[in-house]
């Protein structure tokens, strides 16, 4: 511009003076200008923070990896504080040799690295009866995607030696909630991991330090944190978390049980209620996340008119099975109102349903497994709101 750009023509403080040296922060932290990028909770959702949840700030993130300090937390009995030297993992039940592993023992098994999403079955659970929470952090933020390092559960079970009648596994956490879940042995032997690292460093205490179970594509509740016990059996245990919780009440009063796999789902993270458009008309990057417990995402469609017309979004970044996928739609925004939606399709051809299609099958009594299409009403001033279209 004719007046000149002072940030270019004048020397700034950071250009004039030396900055802090190395080791100022031996464990780095984000820029002070990013202090708004934090996990947040919804105060009225739970009675006590010891059995509660907070949400990943999806609207502030890009790519597919969730930084460790921003992974949503869901604890039923607070965070267990465990010294690794005091942690043990026991395998017993229908095995030839019951075993107890130290953390050091586990690190002597062949190690693998995998990127997987974890989604709480209750993600979007507040939205069954209509649009409720204003922001993708709250409507969809019970998901994170991390690279895990660990050992295959299969190797540990083989070490103990499975009896011929072994069919099920009970996994138990060491925290005060004494959480337990039954897992079919077929899944345990397929792709489950016992993980000690996330994104290259040790698990965070919030995520189950020093050891957690990784159950790719299946509901977050089964990913036992602070994993201490694996019992092998010939039938499921019908514990609290698979009877009174984590079941889906249908319209006719019966409930679906053992609905483990997370369905194909997506959400536009920007623009969204917490991420308004501030630059006016012209080029607008619409961005979001898609995932499926069934595998990879094949395609994501985006609508700007509430689902009447669809265009194919651009998937960018790595496409790992059972991981988050990043999509973009590069729009030339004319400044008019939008009804923004995204619809994911996975590699098996499963299509994310509209909320009404979902309700037609599932009723409105459910909490868990809501994968309906989300709508953001973007106004001419760039702000947006959580709405539903019929
Ligand atoms: N494991 C134990 N031991 N205790 C818990 O409270 N919460 C479960 C699961 N594993 C839980 C647990 C639930 S409901 C979810 S959604 C995930 O952990 C959350 O994992 P995160 O805290 O890493 O996001
Ligand atoms: Co959960």
Image (cartoon, grey):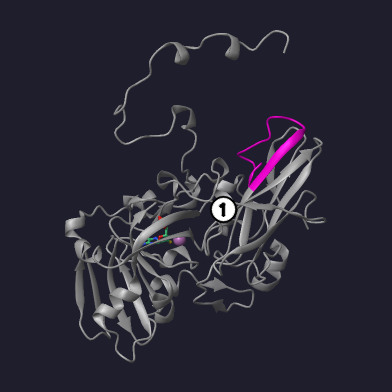
Pick the residue in front: 312 or 57.
Answer: 312
- Using residue 243 as the reference point, say whether residue 330 is left or right of it: right
Q: Position of residue 103 (x, y in %)?
A: 22, 62
- Whether 280 is among the magenta residues is yes
Residue underneath mark 1: 140
Residue 372 makes an appearance in the image = no
Q: Position of residue 88 (x, y in %)?
A: 21, 65
> Above or below — where is 323 with respect to 192?
above
Pick the residue in front: 121 or 327.
Answer: 327
Taking the spot 60% from the left edge, 45% from the top edge, the residue there is 135
> Above or below — where is 315 with respect to 261?
above
Pick the residue in front: 350 or 378.
Answer: 350
Classify residue 307 by image quadrant: bottom right
Could you say whether the residue bearing mark 1 is in a helix, strand or loop? Answer: helix
Q: Position of residue 181 (x, y in %)?
A: 38, 72
Classify residue 369 by image quadrant: bottom right
Taking the spot 48% from the left edge, 66% from the top edge, the residue there is 219
> Above or below — where is 270 with respect to 209?
above
Residue 200 makes an appearance in the image = yes
Where are the magenta residues, as a range? Answer: 269-287
Q: Residue furthest left?
A: 85
Q: Quadrant of the N terminus?
A: top right
- Using residue 386 as the reference point, say whether residue 64 is left or right of it: left
Q: Quadrant of the C terminus?
A: bottom right
Q: Residue furthest bottom?
A: 164
């Amino acid at each position: 511009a004719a007046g000149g750009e002072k940030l270019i023509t004048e020397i700034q403080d950071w250009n004039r003076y030396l900055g802090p040296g190395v080791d100022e922060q031996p464990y780095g932290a984000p820029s002070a200008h990013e202090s708004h990028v934090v996990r947040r909770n919804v105060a009225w959702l739970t009675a006590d923070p010891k059995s509660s949840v907070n949400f990943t700030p999806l609207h502030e993130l890009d790519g597919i990896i969730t930084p460790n300090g921003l992974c949503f937390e869901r604890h039923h009995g607070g965070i267990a504080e465990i010294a690794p030297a005091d942690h043990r993992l026991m395998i017993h039940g229908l095995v030839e040799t019951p075993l107890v592993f130290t953390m050091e023992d586990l690190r002597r098994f062949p190690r693998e690295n995998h990127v997987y999403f974890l989604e709480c079955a209750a993600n979007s659970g507040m939205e069954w009866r209509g649009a409720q929470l204003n922001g993708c952090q709250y409507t969809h933020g019970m998901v994170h995607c991390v690279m895990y390092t660990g050992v295959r559960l299969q190797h540990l079970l083989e070490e103990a030696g499975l009896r011929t009648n072994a069919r099920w596994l009970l996994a138990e956490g060491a925290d005060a909630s004494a959480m337990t879940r039954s897992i079919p042995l077929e899944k345990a032997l397929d792709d489950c991991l016992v993980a000690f690292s996330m994104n290259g460093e040790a698990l965070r205490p919030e995520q189950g330090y020093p050891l957690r179970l990784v159950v790719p594509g299946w509901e977050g509740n089964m990913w036992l944190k602070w994993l201490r016990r694996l019992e092998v059996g010939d039938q499921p245990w019908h514990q609290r978390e698979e009877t009174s919780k984590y079941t889906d009440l249908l319209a006719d009063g019966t409930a679906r049980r053992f609905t483990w796999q997370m369905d194909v789902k997506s959400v536009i993270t920007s623009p969204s209620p917490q991420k308004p458009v501030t630059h006016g008309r012209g080029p607008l990057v619409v961005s979001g996340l898609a995932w499926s417990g069934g595998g990879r995402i094949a395609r994501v469609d985006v609508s700007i008119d509430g689902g009447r017309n669809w265009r194919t979004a651009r998937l960018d970044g790595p496409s790992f099975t059972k991981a988050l996928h990043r999509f973009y739609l590069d729009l030339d925004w004319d400044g008019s109102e939008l009804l923004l939606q995204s619809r994911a399709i996975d590699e098996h051809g499963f299509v994310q349903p509209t909320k009404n299609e979902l309700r037609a099958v599932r009723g409105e009594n459910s909490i868990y497994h809501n994968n309906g299409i989300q709508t953001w009403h973007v106004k001419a001033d760039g702000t947006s709101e959580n709405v539903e279209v019929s």
